[in-house]
Image (cartoon, grey):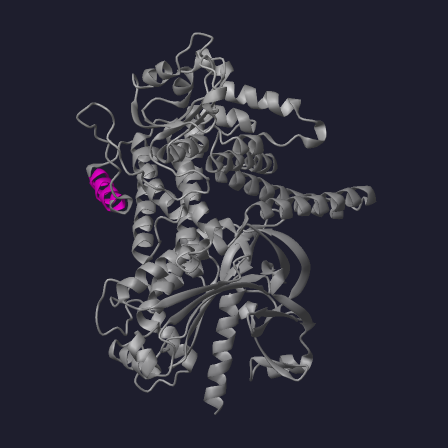
Amino acid sequence: MNLDEALKTFIIESRELLEQMEEALLHIERAQDDPEIINAIFRAAHTIKGSAGLFGLEYIVAFTHVAESVLDRVRSAELQIGADLVALLLFSRDHIGTLVNHADTGEDPSEASNVRSRELITRLNAYLGHKAEVPATAKNGMPAELEPHLERSSAEHVETDNWHISLRFGRDVLRNGMDPLSFIRYLGTFGTLVNVVTVVETVPPISQLDAESCHLGFEISFQTSVDKAMIEGAFDFVRDDCQIRIMPPHSKISEYVQVIRDLPGKEMRLGEILVQCGTLTAAELEQTLRQQAQSEAQDKRPIGEVLLEQHIVRPEVVAAALDKQKQVKDQKTAESSLIRVDAEKLDQLINLVGELTIASAGTALIAQRAGITELQEAASTLSRLVEKVRDSALTLRMVQIGGTFSRFQRVVRDVSRELGKDIELVISGGETELDKTVVEKIGDPLTHLVRNSMDHGIEPAEVRLAQGKPAKGTLRLNAYHDSGSIVIEVSDDGGGLKKDKILRKAIERGLVQPDANLSDKEIFNLIFEAGFSTADVVSNLSGRGVGMDVVRRNISALRGSIDLDSEEGKGTTISIRLPLTLAIIDGFLVGVGKSSFVVPLDLVVECIELSDEDRRAANERNYLSLRGQVLPYLRLRDMFDVKCAPVRRENVVVVQYGNARAGLVVDSLQGEFQTVIKPLSRIFSHINGIGGSTILGSGEVALILDVPRLVQQVGSQAEKSCLEAA
């Protein structure tokens, strides 16, 4: 085995388990009676601990063991989970993540990490309490009689923290030269006989008593540190001539269960698991199998039922062994259907598919120029196959945004406690898929928007109650597909934005002129200006005017846009519109003079010819009537200052982004085109309306239009024209 690769897999899986653990902890307060959630938290901690032990990461094992012990008590209903314990477990989850990071870098935990470990262990131990003391002995050397420590159990017997040995000697044990009491005395050489009760129910009347026959039985409470096999070994000489049942102490049950959970993930039979964990000896298993084999076929019961009926093992241990069998089986099934792929290899595949797409376009162009029918058919078949390969490759990088949304459960919980507000996060559309690269880069902007809504948007409980609102505020995260894009909404039911306050601050900072006539949308968009803030007090969360401009810049870098809608007293909704992928798209190729441009095909509604009447009126207005509706447009020739002779015929490409429509006037329509997006160099990043470039089959470069920016620009120009006309 390559240990480096195995350790890398452990790191990846541990981080995934920690994410699952956090998500479950954030749900547990609202569903305390759901045992599945509690078991999920426990399994995550247990798996990390067990895997860490394989690599000798004792600092992870030691800390996680304490957290796991607390979770085990929660699972057995000995601890009631509440807000304080959830907070402590979340801190512990974060610290396990820090320890995993140390394992990833190959460095020992820092002193700060060690201090944090000790601090959290102390707090966790407070929930575990103190273990029972070792029983004392009386003056005569015999065990002092102690009141049994009762434990909750589904078994029929009263439970203590001692071993319970039930002995029923055979009738001929004395004739065979064996003294029953000698075996009991031998037990005292490696443990303490806490209590011995003689069972005399089988002793016959005195007239029928045979002095050479043994009629006694014993119930023994025994305290020792040895395992079950050694206790059983004390009776090797009389095993065939007596009945022996050895029941472990309650404290030992949890150890057996823990050993079962720590067993390697390989398929084993129930009896093998019980023997390996120590709750069943090989002799007991062999005897039980013989009894099972002697049963008739139709009456043959599972070995677990036989063991429980004979009180050889405890129900909790059998249940743990069955869970282990199911876990191994489920894991094998999952492993057979999934394969883990390195993200770098996936990116390399996408790049190669992009180059293949460009080469396929070149082949199709050559076939068209050659005019050979067979070559054109072959090129067409190649293009279809490349398109399918492209779609399949891009699907590999598509992930659900629900994982990103779920992380904000923790953010909302922590920030709401810090602000002293009661805020609920409602998530919808988590199954919406988009490119993995987009998901990775959207996390920080979303975090800022969520924190900003909680700090500025949602009011304190007393203010909400005074306004007739529920004391608990609601923050919503929603995602859905629309027109070839994904829309992510962050909305709250808070106080909304105050237009007058925003405008006043903007005038004070010189962002707008005092006599400027701005629409509501333009006023709201002022909060995205660098350094702009309406906060009266600077806090740890906001108020310094840093963040919203960065959010817009990061969204723009993803070829997306951000829009804001607010109603004072009702709340605010921020909509982020992003492309589904940053790699390869279906494009619509248009020409202006000798230049070529690509419009994302998902945003194209239709194409129409610009009539002579519309062309004559273009000198006076920049919009036309499309089936009774006003359609503003712009000429790409003027937009990018393309120097070429006028053409007799122009076309309008109608595009839609969100709810806004606009027209792009071009010289020629060149058809659909598989577009491999190439980012522009930084020196061209200031060019408005261009989102990237691509390589055509001819080897020429075509620019990809930034349709959202162009639609926004057309809309602004049309709105200004209407204001001037008014």
Give the image location of residue 374, x and y in percent: 82, 42
Q: Is residue 240 visible?
A: yes
Q: Image quadrant of residue 646?
A: bottom right
Based on the displayed image, in which of its 4 quarters is residue 246 positioned? top left
Residue 680 can be seen in this image: no
Start-end of magenta stretch? 112-125
Residue lying at the far top of the rendered structure: 177
Q: Nearer the viewer, residue 329 or 372?
A: 329
Q: Position of residue 260 (x, y in %)?
A: 45, 31
Where residue 531 sits: x, y (%)?
Answer: 28, 67
Residue 296 is left or right of residue 315, and the answer is right
Residue 491 located left or right of residue 66 = right
436 versus 631 height, above or below: above
Q: Is 92 contained in the magenta span?
A: no
Which residue is nearer to you in this view: 226 or 658?
A: 226
Name the residue furthest front.
Answer: 207
Residue in the foreground of this view, choosing between 694 and 354: 354
Q: Is residue 119 magenta?
A: yes
Q: Is residue 552 above or below residue 392?
A: below
Question: Secondary structure of the magenta portion, mostly?
Answer: helix
